[in-house]
Amino acid sequence: MKRKDQRAALLILALVAMVGAVLLAMSGLKDRAAYFYAPGDLKAGQVPQGAVRIGGMVEKGSLQRAADGVTIAFTVRDESPNRIRVRYKGIVPDLFKEGSGVVAEGSFGPDGLFAASEILAKHDENYMPPRLDAKKGEHKSESLAK
Protein backbone atom coordinates (compact mmCIF):
# COMPACT_ATOMS: atom_id res chain seq x y z
CA MET A 1 0.00 0.00 0.00
CA LYS A 2 1.23 3.43 -0.88
CA ARG A 3 1.73 6.07 1.79
CA LYS A 4 -1.06 8.21 0.29
CA ASP A 5 -3.49 5.26 0.41
CA GLN A 6 -2.53 4.53 4.03
CA ARG A 7 -3.33 8.12 5.06
CA ALA A 8 -6.67 8.00 3.26
CA ALA A 9 -7.57 4.69 4.91
CA LEU A 10 -6.53 6.03 8.34
CA LEU A 11 -8.62 9.20 7.82
CA ILE A 12 -11.67 7.17 6.78
CA LEU A 13 -11.21 4.84 9.75
CA ALA A 14 -10.94 7.84 12.13
CA LEU A 15 -14.11 9.40 10.70
CA VAL A 16 -16.03 6.12 11.02
CA ALA A 17 -14.84 5.76 14.62
CA MET A 18 -15.92 9.34 15.46
CA VAL A 19 -19.36 8.86 13.92
CA GLY A 20 -19.74 5.57 15.78
CA ALA A 21 -18.77 7.20 19.08
CA VAL A 22 -21.24 10.05 18.57
CA LEU A 23 -24.06 7.66 17.70
CA LEU A 24 -23.26 5.47 20.70
CA ALA A 25 -23.25 8.49 23.03
CA MET A 26 -26.54 9.79 21.60
CA SER A 27 -28.26 6.43 22.00
CA GLY A 28 -27.03 6.14 25.59
CA LEU A 29 -28.21 9.63 26.52
CA LYS A 30 -31.60 9.70 24.81
CA ASP A 31 -33.41 8.55 27.96
CA ARG A 32 -31.37 10.79 30.26
CA ALA A 33 -31.82 14.08 28.41
CA ALA A 34 -33.01 16.90 30.64
CA TYR A 35 -36.23 17.62 28.82
CA PHE A 36 -39.35 18.58 30.71
CA TYR A 37 -43.07 18.74 30.04
CA ALA A 38 -44.76 22.14 30.14
CA PRO A 39 -48.40 22.30 31.28
CA GLY A 40 -49.45 22.96 27.68
CA ASP A 41 -47.76 19.72 26.57
CA LEU A 42 -49.97 17.64 28.85
CA LYS A 43 -53.54 17.26 27.73
CA ALA A 44 -56.20 16.49 30.33
CA GLY A 45 -56.06 12.86 31.38
CA GLN A 46 -52.87 12.13 29.43
CA VAL A 47 -50.12 12.29 32.02
CA PRO A 48 -46.87 10.37 31.61
CA GLN A 49 -46.22 7.49 33.98
CA GLY A 50 -43.07 7.13 36.06
CA ALA A 51 -40.50 9.78 36.90
CA VAL A 52 -40.72 12.88 34.68
CA ARG A 53 -39.81 16.54 34.78
CA ILE A 54 -42.28 19.37 34.45
CA GLY A 55 -41.40 22.99 33.96
CA GLY A 56 -42.95 26.41 33.75
CA MET A 57 -43.60 29.43 35.92
CA VAL A 58 -44.79 29.34 39.53
CA GLU A 59 -48.23 30.95 39.35
CA LYS A 60 -48.53 34.10 41.47
CA GLY A 61 -50.74 33.58 44.50
CA SER A 62 -50.55 29.80 44.31
CA LEU A 63 -47.70 29.11 46.75
CA GLN A 64 -48.92 27.56 50.01
CA ARG A 65 -46.65 26.51 52.86
CA ALA A 66 -47.73 23.78 55.29
CA ALA A 67 -47.40 24.13 59.05
CA ASP A 68 -44.48 21.65 59.14
CA GLY A 69 -42.29 24.26 57.40
CA VAL A 70 -40.97 21.97 54.66
CA THR A 71 -44.04 21.00 52.63
CA ILE A 72 -45.20 23.37 49.92
CA ALA A 73 -47.89 23.27 47.26
CA PHE A 74 -47.96 25.48 44.18
CA THR A 75 -49.22 25.64 40.61
CA VAL A 76 -47.00 25.54 37.50
CA ARG A 77 -48.31 27.39 34.46
CA ASP A 78 -47.25 28.42 30.99
CA GLU A 79 -48.93 30.37 28.18
CA SER A 80 -51.59 27.69 27.77
CA PRO A 81 -54.72 27.50 29.93
CA ASN A 82 -53.42 24.24 31.48
CA ARG A 83 -52.05 24.22 35.02
CA ILE A 84 -50.26 21.54 37.06
CA ARG A 85 -50.68 21.33 40.84
CA VAL A 86 -47.41 20.36 42.56
CA ARG A 87 -46.62 19.21 46.09
CA TYR A 88 -43.05 19.11 47.39
CA LYS A 89 -41.58 18.22 50.75
CA GLY A 90 -38.08 19.55 51.33
CA ILE A 91 -35.99 22.67 51.24
CA VAL A 92 -36.48 24.76 48.13
CA PRO A 93 -33.67 26.68 46.36
CA ASP A 94 -33.15 30.35 47.25
CA LEU A 95 -34.30 31.46 43.79
CA PHE A 96 -37.65 29.67 44.14
CA LYS A 97 -40.54 32.12 44.46
CA GLU A 98 -43.87 33.03 42.89
CA GLY A 99 -43.52 34.28 39.34
CA SER A 100 -40.14 32.58 38.79
CA GLY A 101 -39.24 29.66 36.57
CA VAL A 102 -39.16 26.17 38.01
CA VAL A 103 -38.37 22.62 36.92
CA ALA A 104 -39.73 19.88 39.17
CA GLU A 105 -38.81 16.21 38.98
CA GLY A 106 -41.23 13.60 40.31
CA SER A 107 -44.33 11.69 39.28
CA PHE A 108 -48.05 12.17 38.81
CA GLY A 109 -50.43 10.61 41.28
CA PRO A 110 -53.76 9.02 40.33
CA ASP A 111 -55.54 12.28 41.20
CA GLY A 112 -53.37 14.29 38.77
CA LEU A 113 -51.32 15.95 41.54
CA PHE A 114 -47.61 16.06 40.76
CA ALA A 115 -45.52 14.82 43.71
CA ALA A 116 -42.11 16.42 43.26
CA SER A 117 -38.97 14.79 44.61
CA GLU A 118 -36.66 17.61 43.47
CA ILE A 119 -37.16 21.31 42.71
CA LEU A 120 -34.82 23.28 40.46
CA ALA A 121 -35.29 27.05 40.32
CA LYS A 122 -34.50 28.83 37.08
CA HIS A 123 -33.32 32.41 36.78
CA ASP A 124 -33.42 34.82 33.89
CA GLU A 125 -30.46 36.15 31.95
CA ASN A 126 -30.24 39.21 34.26
CA TYR A 127 -29.49 37.21 37.41
CA MET A 128 -26.80 38.71 39.64
CA PRO A 129 -25.65 36.81 42.73
CA PRO A 130 -25.58 38.78 45.98
CA ARG A 131 -22.34 40.68 46.45
CA LEU A 132 -20.23 40.02 49.53
CA ASP A 133 -19.37 43.20 51.41
CA ALA A 134 -15.71 42.60 52.24
CA LYS A 135 -15.64 45.08 55.12
CA LYS A 136 -18.53 43.65 57.11
CA GLY A 137 -18.61 40.08 55.81
CA GLU A 138 -22.30 40.49 54.88
CA HIS A 139 -24.17 39.72 51.70
CA LYS A 140 -25.74 42.66 49.90
CA SER A 141 -28.20 42.52 47.04
CA GLU A 142 -27.79 44.89 44.15
CA SER A 143 -30.61 45.87 41.89
CA LEU A 144 -29.94 46.06 38.18
CA ALA A 145 -32.46 48.86 37.73
CA LYS A 146 -30.89 52.04 39.18
Image (cartoon, rainbow, N blue to C red):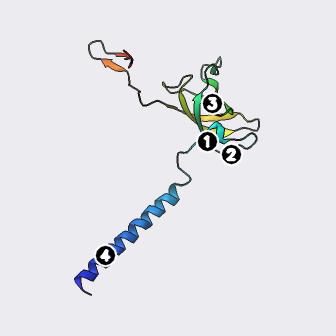
Contact, CB < 8 Å: mark 1 with mark 2?
yes
Relative height, residue 145 to residue 92 (above, below): above
- On screen, 68 above or below 88? above
Gap between marks 1 and 4, in whole Å? 44 Å
Hey, what amino acid is under mark 3? Val
Q: Residues within 10 Å of mark 2 (few under 14, many from 20)?
A: few
CA–CA distance in space, label 4 to label 3 = 54 Å
Labels 4 and 3: the sequence-earlier one: 4
The residue singled out by tag 4 in the image is 10
Q: How far is the residue under mark 1 from the one under mark 3?
A: 11 Å
- The image quadrant where one finds the C terminus is top left
Q: Position of residue 57 (x, y in %)?
A: 58, 29
Please report whichever mark, 1 or 4, sits nearer to the chain's N-terminal start. 4
Question: Picture quarter containing residue 135?
Answer: top left
- Amino acid type, callout 2: Pro
Residue where numbered disc 1 is placed: 37
User: Measured from the top left, where is residue 32 in percent x and y?
Assistant: 54, 50
Number of other residues with Cα within 10 Å of mark 3, as a class: few under 14, some 14 to 19, many 20 or more:
many
Q: Is residue 62 above or below residue 44?
A: above
| Labels 2 & 4 near each other (Cβ < 8 A) | no
First in sequence: mark 1 or mark 2? 1
Which dot marks residue 76? 3
